[in-house]
Image (spheres, helix red, strand yellow):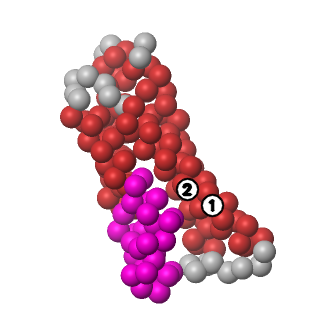
Amino acid sequence: MSSEARLRTIETRLAASTLVMTALFAPLEVIATVQMFGGIAGIVHPGFVASVGGVVLAAAGALRSLRARPRRAPALMCAAHAWGTGGLWHALGVRYQFLREGGELFYGSMEFWAVALLVALVTAMFALSTYLTVRADS
């Protein structure tokens, strides 16, 4: 398999993984937001609005990559991973600070560790999509 074909295969798998993660994350984010903010009012919270933007960007990036085949087109997906990585690192930092100040998270320690796991996963996806984007220009 050529280097270009190998990179296309990696990109296709990353795009498919991005779509699966998006499909899992979106409903969980809505449910958690509605529960934590006591109803539909949480939908206008800036953190939720940013999450919606990230979900739309992730779906658009992954679909753009998949539709470009056999060419490679990882750039929009890379931007989506950057958005998600930034948002999740912020979410983890806010939870960490809240715990340090003696607060109790809505879902307990599971909430902290779930966000930490997502941070690790999305950061790895961002690193891989960055590599694919850099290699797409060469």
Decide: is 127 above or below 52: above
Q: Which mark is residue 88?
A: 2
Is 44 included in the stretch rendered in magenta? yes
- Is residue 86 or residue 46 the one in the foreground? 46
Q: Is residue 125 visible?
A: no
User: What percent of the width, then of the height, locates residue 54?
Assistant: 42, 53
Are the residues at dot 1 and dot 2 in contact (C-beta closer than 8 Å)?
yes
Q: Neighbour class for label 1 at 10 Å: few (<14), some, many (≥20)?
A: many
Marks 1 and 2, how far apart at CA: 6 Å
Q: Residue at x 23, y 29 (%)?
A: 68
Q: Residue at x 44, y 37 (%)?
A: 78
Q: Neighbour class for label 2 at 10 Å: few (<14), some, many (≥20)?
A: many
Q: Is residue 77 left or right of residue 69?
A: right
Where residue 101 sits, quadrant-wise, is bottom right
Label 1 SS:
helix
Q: Which mark is residue 92?
A: 1
User: What percent of the width, then of the height, locates residue 95?
Assistant: 65, 68
Region in magenta:
26-54
User: What percent of the width, then of the height, locates residue 107?
Assistant: 56, 79
